[in-house]
Each structure stands twice: as C-alpha cells, then as structure tokens.
Amino acid sequence: MKIVDIHIGKIKIPLKKPFKTALRTVYFAEDIIVKLLTRSGLVGFGSAAPTLAITGESSDSIISCLHHILKPKIIGADLSQLEKVMGELHSSFVNNTSALAAIDMAYYDLLAQSLNLPLFKYLGGFHNLVFTDITISANSPEVMVADALVALDEGFQDLKLKLGVNPSLDFIRVQAVRTAVGNQVKISLDANQAWGAKEAVRIIRRFEKLNLNIEFVEQPVKAKKISDLRYVSEHVETDILADESVFSPFDALQLINNKACDLINLKLAKAGGIYNATKILNIAEAAGIECVMGCMLESQISVTAAAHFAAAKKSIVRCDLDSPALLAENPVVGGVQVEGNTLTLSETDVGLGIKDVIGVEYLKF
Ligand SMILES: C[C@H](N)C(=O)N[C@H](CCC(=O)O)C(=O)O
Ligand SMILES: [Mg+2]
C-alpha cells in the first residue's frame, strides 16, 4: 500500500497559562500538522511543534523541510517497506527532527491502520494506558505553590517544577512547593540547562541535605557539555535525567559510555520519531538506564503518538506527557483520551485513532 499525497497545515492552540522555562516563555502552542494519504483512502496524522530553543526548528523551517525535502521522499513510499523508507528519510539530512517525527508518526499511523491494529499493539502492546506528571512553570514561589495545589486538585500526583529563571529563587521555589504539597507527592525538577556544573551540584546537594525528596533533576547544565553532565551525576546522590543532551541513538550511547546520566528523557520530536526512539530505548534498556517518555508543548496528535509508544513498551514506566493538560483547547478528534493524569488508548481504534483535527489552516504551495 503506497502513500500518494501529503497535506501540510498550521494550527495555534491557546494555553491555560503562559508556559515558562529557562529557555523560553510561550503564550500559545503552535503546531504544524501533517496528513499522509494512501490510494485506498487511509489518512495518517502527524504533527511537529516548533521549539527553536531545543530542536532549532521554527514553523517556517518545519514547513520548508516537510514540503521540499520530506514530501518528495514520502510520496510513493510503501507501507510494507519500513526499513527502506526510514533508511532513506534518516540518511537524507541531519537535524530537523520534529519535521521528521511528524512524517514518521503519520507513516506508523498508516502502517498500523493497514494491519488493522491500534498503534500501541503494533509497537509491543504492553499496556493501553500511561500516567503523566504535570509541569509547573517557573514563576515566583507563591505562584508555583498555587499552581501545584491546582494540579493536585486536578488529579496529578507527580509534579515537575521548572527552574532556572532567576536561579537565585530556585531553592525557595522547591522548598515552598514541598512544604505546601507534603511528602507523598512526587517532585522532579527541570532546569533546562540553566545552571553551571558546580552551581548545579551546590543546589542539588542543598535539596538533599534538607530531605526535599527530589525524584530526579532534568538537564541541569548545557546540552552539549557532556563532561558537565557527568560531573553533576558523579557529585550528587539524586538521579540526573538527560533531556536536551539526547536526540539520537548515538547521543544516548555517548552519554551512557561517559556515565553522564542516570535517566534519559525520550521525545519523538528530538529522536525524529518512533523509528529512532525505539533504538534509543533499546540502547538504554541494554545499559540498564530507564527512559522517561517526554513531550514538547505540542498538540494531542504527537502526544497521542508518544502515548502509543510509551504504552507499548514495558520499560517505559514514567511519562512527562502533560502537554494536553497545559492547553486550553483540544482541536483533535479521537486519539488518546486524557483525564487528569491518565492517558488512555482505545483497544479498537486502529493506528493512532485520530479522526480529524478542527481549525487547521492547510497550506497551498
Ligand atoms: C511540556 C513538557 N512537560 C516539558 O516540560 N517539555 C520541556 C520542553 C518543552 C518546550 O519548551 O516546549 C522539557 O522537558 O524540557
Ligand atoms: Mg526537559
């Protein structure tokens, strides 16, 4: 079964609150939508969120890559030739991982549909649901406490606090939230590269001394500074999760060989989709490193793909798939069902299970 056409569109989704990290403040979510069509009438969905500060991609660069580079390669691609198709896509350019992920997930959507299976069953079928944490944006300690209490009311039991915006406040932020939510709630921290190596060690050791009970600290130092990540990992007890440092299977190997992290944040937008995410997961599993399934601030299309992947795999036991909970609207019809911290996949809908996306402006070239 061959792919005969591609539609590329744009959508803007309002947020419940501005999303603030050490890398960026965002007031609405932007997504580039992809639809792949087969001659027999199947439609596969994918999406890419422009996260310039992490993947280096803007809306324009994603659209350009999809139209000029990926479209000529994916039109005519056969669903029965996964290795050939992915080999060609992965060898034709570097970077542009979100654009590649959008095509990859739409291809896997079609592949599972053609086999009459929900995607999570095609990928391994371990569960049909996953649980997510929720991200609390970097704000004043008072606002972060208020946001954390709202999140608990909404059913979340696992908080990821964004730090590194005005780092002098970081210690008070964490202490204030821990005091407000009590000891039963899980807290992890994401500095999004904001700290220096010695600063990170100093801050994390202070959390340890006061028994603030932190699950893990995500990307404390610059993405490319593997030796800094290793320094932090070596000098603290708390687990260190690599995020922006891991895009490719090679990145994962390099971090593992350098003993630079305890955990890996696996995102389809960084890996270029399910094909390479599978390789990273396999490398990490062989090395005894656990992966957390993560997401960007992105629509429920790509979060549906990430939920299928995470649910399929026995070794993914933690998820940061909270983007749907941060969006004020969901334009996606079908796909993953989100209720509080629980993301559930249909046992009977085939592929990603997405029926439509409302309000997309499809582009004419
Ligand atoms: C939304 C998710 N929980 C998250 O925090 N992802 C960020 C990057 C997201 C972005 O800037 O769009 C992360 O883990 O660093
Ligand atoms: Mg992160």
Image (spheres, rainbow, N blue to C red):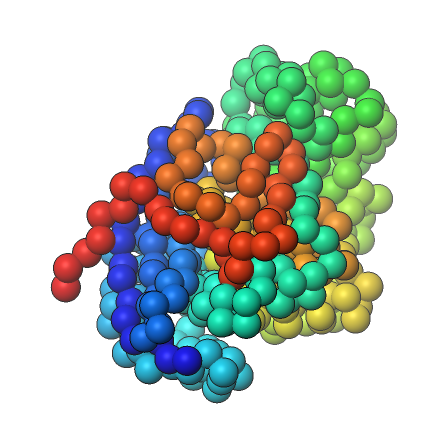
Q: Nearer the viewer, residue 128 or 9?
A: 128
Residue at 53%, 29% in the rendered image: 137
Which residue is pictured at 41% across the width and 58% down the height? 46
Answer with the quarter of the image where residue 196 lies.
top right
> Is residue 210 found left or right of 92 in the rendered image?
right
Residue 333 in view: yes
Q: Position of residue 335 (x, y in %)?
A: 50, 48
- Residue drawn 33% across the image and 82% down it: 76
Instruction: Depth check: give the residue in front, 252 or 273.
Output: 273
Tally the marks. Answer: 0
- Relative to 150, residue 352 above or below: below
In this rendered view, identify the residue nearer to me: 268 or 207.
268
Q: Is residue 242 visible?
A: no
Q: Residue at x 24, y 72 (%)?
A: 68
**For this view, does 256 lie left or right of residue 307?**
right
Q: Residue 45: x and y, percent?
A: 40, 58
Which image quadrant is residue 116 in? bottom right
Residue 180 position in % (x across, y down): 72, 14
Depth order, front residue of 214/227 = 214
Q: Position of residue 318 (x, y in %)?
A: 71, 47
**Vertical side of 4 occupied by 173: above or below:** above
**Quadrant (top left/top right/bottom left/bottom right) for the C terminus:** bottom left
- The residue lying furthest to the left in this view is 365
Quadrant assignment for the N terminus: bottom left
